[in-house]
Amino acid sequence: MIWVEQNVPQHIKPYVRSEYLGVEYNLLKKGKLVYKKMSELGYREFVSETKEGE
């Protein structure tokens, strides 16, 4: 766990910790009740293209 704390970027630490501990995790959820937005998942191009095509 020390290596994870020192070497893994902050935005993916929870996923790396969960993988290491064998705990299930969901890449689409942020917290227990909220889902991430497309832009938070790295789909900025998709989001900007969608807005332009409206």
Image: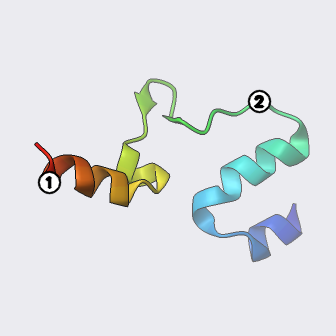
Label 2 Cα neighbours within 10 Å, binned few <14 / some 14-19 / many ≥20: few
Toward the bottom, the furthest residue is 6
Label 1 Cα neighbours within 10 Å, binned few <14 / some 14-19 / many ≥20: few
Badge 1 element: helix
Picture disc at residue 52: 1
x 57%, y 60%: residue: 11
x 69%, y 57%: residue: 13
In the displayed structure, 29 sits above or below 49; it is: above
Badge 2 element: loop
- Label 2 belongs to which residue? 24
Instruction: Name the one closer to the observer, 44 or 25.
Output: 44
In the displayed structure, 20 sits above or below 23; it is: below
x 60%, y 39%: residue: 27
Q: Amino acid at mark 2?
A: Glu
Q: Position of residue 37 (x, y in %)?
A: 37, 42
Name the side, left or right, on which 7 lies relative to 14: right
Q: Amino acid at mark 1?
A: Glu
Q: Position of residue 18 (x, y in %)?
A: 78, 42
Q: Quadrant of the N terminus?
A: bottom right
Name the side, left or right, on which 15 lies relative to 53: right
Q: What colour-coding does the image apply?
A: rainbow
Q: Position of residue 38 (x, y in %)?
A: 38, 45
